[in-house]
Amino acid sequence: MLNIQSKLPKVGDTIFNEMSTLALQHQAINLGQGFPDYQPPEALLEEVCQAIRRGPNQYAPMAGIPALRAAIASKVQAQHGVTYQADTEITVTSGATEALASSILALVHAGDEVILIDPAYDLYAPVIELAGGVPIRVPLRVPSPENPQFQLDWNAIEAVIRPSSRLLVLNFPHNPTGITLKEADLDALETLLAHSRLLLLSDEAYEHIIFDGRVQYSPVSRPQLAARCVLVSSFGKTFHATGWKVGYCCAPAALMTEIRKVHQYAVYSVSTPVQAGIAAYLQQGAQLDALSGFYQQKRDRLAAGLQQTILRALPSEGTFFLLVDASALGDLPEKTLSLRILHQCGVASIPVSAFYDDPHAPEANHRLLRLCFAKLDATLDAAIERLQTLRIA
Ligand code: PMP
Ligand code: GLN
């Protein structure tokens, strides 16, 4: 027998894989794992297909094709007023996943503490551990009758900052809660970081999906914060193309030099024709602003339908997720609630507890489930119809 000592003994199959597999087995409507059930824009498909037919089809430059890096520089400049040099400060990555992993592996040293905000996307903690770092998890304030949303608690974050703290990971619009950053949060962050050596990793995978006229307040819009921040995003969400796995990161050259050292040996470079197609599409003036309206309509459709169910929808300010309170089904662990809904009416969801260190802990279980509304209206309507059959326990 091979005697392998696991580097990640606590890690199993991700909740996203687990619930998608169960959804297939039970022929359930999958509102669990976050991916659209519709195609990317036609003009983008055309550009990518043309690039595949005519080339380029050989290795891209390690940091990404120049046209795409230039298009990312223009996009970020227009959004946040910050200039990144395409040759030294922008790297095209294999999804936001690789941008996050390469950044953490490059910047976190053994013993460094990395602050995560719980509930936290599942990737961060295991990669921090691979880097020899120590995740320090600070919870969001949980929803209450007076305030039905999760809330940032800057005092709690300040309380864990120590000389060994190296990195603070932010993710807004936030998966899974759908909360967003406000201008006052950037003020708080500036004050907090003024006297620390903390770097920032800002996962903005859902940057273009933000509702009710809100704007995406990125830390990179503040020069003091941009000087120590890695900005990460993904074309997967923005272009309904999660399977293409193309994302990017932007950071000051001193940080990017180190990130590229990991990127070049983990991945080297990313699909050349897909990069070329995305670059051409962005150059055509892709209407990224329209995405928020597109998803707001879907959020509202799902939330309205849920009013006729025993589930209670929480507000969602961004992302393509909303949380539902499933307390009416009983005071049960979230995973049990999620499985009960899957078995009773054939709709898959994600328990929010999966985004905490210990999904079984009482502090991780608030009877909340995440539903993905990146679905055709017909899919949402069918899911609502099924959810309406749920009965109080
Ligand atoms: N960060 C967050 C918060 C995400 O939700 C996701 C995936 N949905 C990613 C990163 C990974 O993005 P990608 O699929 O581009 O690797
Ligand atoms: N980010 C997606 C979600 O939150 C899942 C991506 C994955 O399965 N790794 O649903």
Image (tube, helix red, strand yellow):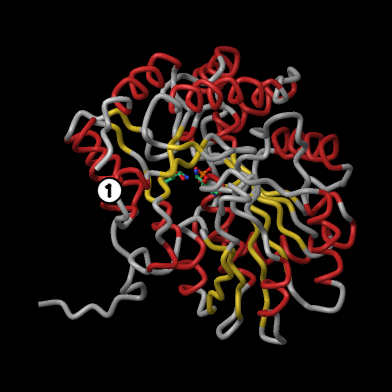
- Which residue is found at the position 32% from the left and 25% from the top? 388
Is 101 rendered above or below residue 310? below
Q: Nearer the viewer, residue 168 or 266?
A: 168
Dot 1 falls on a residue whose secondary structure is helix
- Which residue is found at the position 60% from the left and 13% from the top? 43
Q: Nearer the viewer, residue 194 or 130?
A: 194
Q: Nearer the viewer, residue 388 or 111?
A: 388
324 relative to 83 in the view: left or right: left
Where, by quadrant of the figure, is residue 359 drawn? bottom left
**Image spot of residue 149 (x, y percent):** 60, 48
338 relative to 229 in the view: left or right: left
- Which residue is found at the position 45% from the left and 27% from the top? 307
Q: Residue furthest left?
A: 1
Q: Quadrant of the N terminus?
A: bottom left
Where, by quadrant of the figure, is residue 226 drawn? bottom right
**Image spot of residue 224 (x, y percent):** 88, 62
Where, by quadrant of the figure, is residue 36 drawn? top left
- Pointer 1 residue: 18
Is 307 rendered above or below residue 332? above
Q: Quadrant of the C terminus?
A: top left
Is 205 rendered above or below residue 89? above
**Image spot of residue 321 (x, y percent):** 51, 37
- Amino acid type at image mark 1: Glu
76 relative to 341 in the view: left or right: right
**Image spot of residue 9 (x, y percent):** 31, 74
Q: Nearer the viewer, residue 202 or 263?
A: 202
